Image (spheres, grey):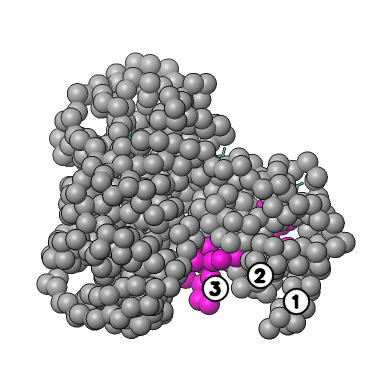
Amino acid sequence: MSVLIYAEQEQGVFRKQSLEAASYASAWAKAQGTSAEAVVFGHADSDSLAQYGIRKLHQINENQSERFEAHSHAWAIANIAKKSGVKLVVLGASANAQSLAPLLAVHLDAAYVSGVVAMPEASAPMTFKRAVFTNKGFSQTEVSSEVAIISLSANAYGLHPHPVSCSNEATSLPELNAQAKTTPGLIDKVQGKISIADAEIVVSAGRGLKGPENWGMIEELAQVLGGATACSKPVSDLGWRPHSEHVGQTGKPVASNLYIAVGISGAIQHLAGVSASKTKVVINTDPEAPFFKAADYGIVGDAFEVVPQLIEKIKAFKSQNA
Amino acid sequence: MKILVCISNVPDTTAKINFKDNDTQFDTQGVPFVINPNDEFGLTRAMWFKEQNGATVDVATVGDASVEATLRKALAIGADEAYRIDTPALDGIQVAKELAALVKENGYDLVIAGRESIDYNGGMVPGIMAGILGYSFVHKCIELQIDGQTATAVREIDGGKETLTAQLPLVIGGQKGLVEEKDLKIPNMRGIMMARQKTLQVLPGIQAKSMTRDVHFAKPAARNQTTMISKDNLDELIEKLHTEAKVI
Ligand SMILES: Cc1cc2nc3c(=O)[nH]c(=O)nc-3n(C[C@H](O)[C@H](O)[C@H](O)COP(=O)(O)OP(=O)(O)OC[C@H]3O[C@@H](n4cnc5c(N)ncnc54)[C@H](O)[C@@H]3O)c2cc1C
Ligand SMILES: Nc1ncnc2c1ncn2[C@@H]1O[C@H](COP(=O)(O)O)[C@@H](O)[C@H]1O
């Protein structure tokens, strides 16, 4: 009956998404009179999960490696879920969670509901609120299967500490033998930079910046705020910035606490993908730019004038409030 | 090599979204429909396999007759055969089961679907197909090369990318990067004329069942007013971000 989460670590630290999943799962488990458990691959320290209400950690010691492989990981989680009689599996919105979720759904003959933004609205049948039409709407989705798998929109439910004690159970599973397994190779990842998926603050810039040589100030603004950098679609199409920074309806979704848009007009496809962000600041020379209508705070001004000043002022603010 | 590209018929990216019948249905009135953007990248990538390796490229959509215009467009871009599985798309699980049955029947080596449809944002059809069929699976695929039975693919991960190898048969959830925006194929006059002569095959499907139902829709809540701040008063912005929005 318990609720299970897939907990992901990044350099030995659980990702915020996973702690959100833990918060969600433990709140729901409590309401249902059951407990929340977690699956983790490789070595893990259960303390931080215990802070968010996880009572049992299934630690899978993979024989080969701790590298993610969708089929193998889905299969391993399915094994644990079946053994524990799990009715709900809660995942984050990471690239890995999104690749294994549908495979897991097949193993567990479960419905998969993605982009969930709130606690279940009903338990029989389980009903979830999720974002649809790329944030242009919400749906209440009713599940008719016995087991459900959900993935949470980042930053929607949030972190809710609920300290409990957590037991740690090492589980070794026979290796999945399937031709369908992929062989993971080279990872190309900028070290020490926050990814858009994990960032609480995102600084994004558009064609108003004129050229790639002008991104220094965007990088710096992101850095002083401890945020990630992003860009509009034409900027990545022009090759000014990597595709991985493209946000919007056809790029990455952004659901940060703070989204700063510099020199971005605010086309509907851009807005759809970033509108889940809680606070939006828009800096644009054109007072008629559509983005202002979707902003919380707007500054009409030249990015080349405003951004450097903003960097200095935030630095001063940070040193005062440190 | 036999390739199937799965095409989802979605509202144009600029469409305004409204609901009807007491907010229980998406209102399609006046909404132009297009090939799901993620599928456009996959379709063009498939056409390159056709040009370079002589692959055959079929396209399929699960849906009623209203999706045929979108399938015709795919034929005009150069697809060989188009299949419409004649049943309304209910959810990602039902759609994936229908498509997986077609894949089994026709025996494709490569199945290209999109990372997600921009309408219901399920992000599940390719993965569920891979799960049902027991095929290799690469989600958020941004590059794909195939040599014999081995595929080398790059997938997007959070904060970077990962290269992997996989054996065919393979299902991918594709997106921009498979090809660039500027390379997207659009129908030309000759393609449109040829598409007219191609038949669009309507299949009864396997009556797969769905597991979810959208029972009610809502639009996002009205937003707060925008507070305009003078560019000469950035301290006010910082103050507001700190005390009002509490984000710094
Ligand atoms: C199918 C489809 C999907 C799409 N998906 C996406 C998507 O996912 N994400 C996305 O972003 N777009 C997407 N688009 C593109 C979208 O329609 C817009 O073209 C794009 O968002 C515009 O980018 P931009 O705001 O950077 O550029 P522009 O529209 O050119 O705007 C530049 C802005 O910068 C301002 N500016 C100029 N100089 C300065 C200065 N010195 N200081 C401050 N401001 C300045 C201008 O006033 C203007 O508002 C999609 C389009 C289509 C057709
Ligand atoms: N009704 C459908 N017919 C054919 N393919 C579909 C359909 N719905 C979704 N797909 C495919 O599955 C991908 C992901 O869709 P989804 O899982 O619905 O977000 C799409 O990009 C399409 O390639």
Which residue in the rendered view is the most extreme toward the right?
B232
Taking A76 as reference, is B108 above or below it?
Answer: above
Numbered circle sitting on residue A193: 3
- State which mark lies toward you, 3 or 2: 2
C-alpha distance separating marks 3 and 1: 22 Å
Helix, strand or loop at label 2? It is loop
Asked if marks 3 and 1 fall on the same chain, the answer is yes
Q: Nearer the viewer, residue B234 or A224?
A: B234
Work out how far the residue at label 2 is from the one at label 1, CA to CA, in angstroms: 10 Å
Label 1 sits on a secondary structure element that is: helix
Residue A60 horizontal side relative to residue A184, left or right: left
Badge 2 vs badge 1, beta-carbon distance below 8 Å: yes
Measured as percent of width and height from the top left, residue B236 is found at: 80, 64
- Tell me the subunit letter for badge 3: A
Q: Which residue is mark 1?
A: A317
Position of A120 with respect to B242 (left or right) is: left
- Horizontal side of B153 relative to A178 (left or right) equals right
Q: Residue A184 — which label?
A: none
Q: Is residue A183 visible to the viewer in this orientation of the structure?
A: no
Tell me the residue at 30%/27% (across/down): B88
Q: Which segment did they paint magenta?
A: A188-215
Name the residue rendered at 19%, 23% in the picture.
B204
- The residue under label 2 is which amino acid type? Ile
Chain letter of disc 1?
A
State which quadrant residue A141 falls in. top left
